[in-house]
Image (cartoon, rainbow, N blue to C red):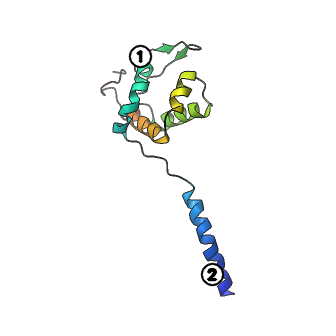
């Protein structure tokens, strides 16, 4: 009977290992690594009171000081098509999970005193 229990546990071990490793860790954002992608954002998001006009008029929020979790959720929403804006869907679609984490880290670290943050 003991051998049966040991074999059962040994057989379950690989399945447990696979189940635990299926949940990939979310990437940790690095604000310095966001520099290569920030240029895509500042054309619209660095202009106070900017509104885009294609295909409809959208108010474009400033990103400096936004909560990192919000930025991640918004970009992933554009990737999934849950958020509708052709420009943002295209840009977000080109970003990896690491790019998104880096951008979230970059913008969440900004304050009114940060360079390139127009909320001063």
Is the Cβ of the residue at disc 1 closer than 8 Å to that at disc 2? no
Residue 28 higher or lower than 57, as above or below: below
Q: CA distance from mark 1 to mark 2?
A: 66 Å
Q: Secondary structure at mark 1?
A: loop
- At x 33%, y 37%, the residue is 32
Give the label on residue 6, or none. Answer: 2
Considering only vertical position in the picture, is 3 above or below 13? below
Residue 6 locus on image (x, y percent): 63, 81
Query: What residue is shown with label 1?
Result: 48
- State the quadrant of the N terminus: bottom right
Q: Secondary structure at mark 2?
A: helix
Task: Specify whether 82 is left or right of 49.
Answer: right
- Total labels: the figure holds 2
First in sequence: mark 1 vs mark 2: 2
The C terminus appears in which quarter of the rendering? top left
Point out residue 57 in the picture as x, y percentages from the top left corner: 56, 13
Front position in the image: 37 or 27: 37
Please rate how many residues cluster around mark 1, counting C-alpha atoms within 10 Å: few if below 14, some from 14 to 19, many from 20.
Answer: some
Q: Tell me which residue sits at (49%, 47%) in the image.
A: 26
Residue at 40% in and 20% down: 46
| Vertical comparison of 102 with 53: above or below | below
Quadrant in the rendering for residue 112: top left
3 sits to left or right of 74: right
């Amino acid at each position: 009977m003991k051998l049966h229990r040991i074999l059962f546990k040994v057989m379950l071990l690989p399945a447990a290992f696979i189940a635990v490793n299926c949940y990939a860790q979310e990437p940790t954002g690095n604000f310095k690594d966001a520099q290569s992608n920030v240029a895509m954002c500042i054309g619209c998001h660095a202009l106070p009171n900017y509104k885009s006009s294609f295909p409809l008029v959208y108010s474009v929020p400033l990103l400096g000081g936004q909560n990192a979790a919000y930025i991640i959720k918004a970009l992933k929403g554009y990737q999934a098509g849950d958020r509708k804006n052709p420009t943002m869907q295209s840009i977000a679609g080109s970003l990896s999970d690491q790019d998104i984490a880096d951008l979230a880290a970059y913008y969440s670290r900004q304050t009114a005193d940060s360079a390139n943050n127009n909320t001063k």
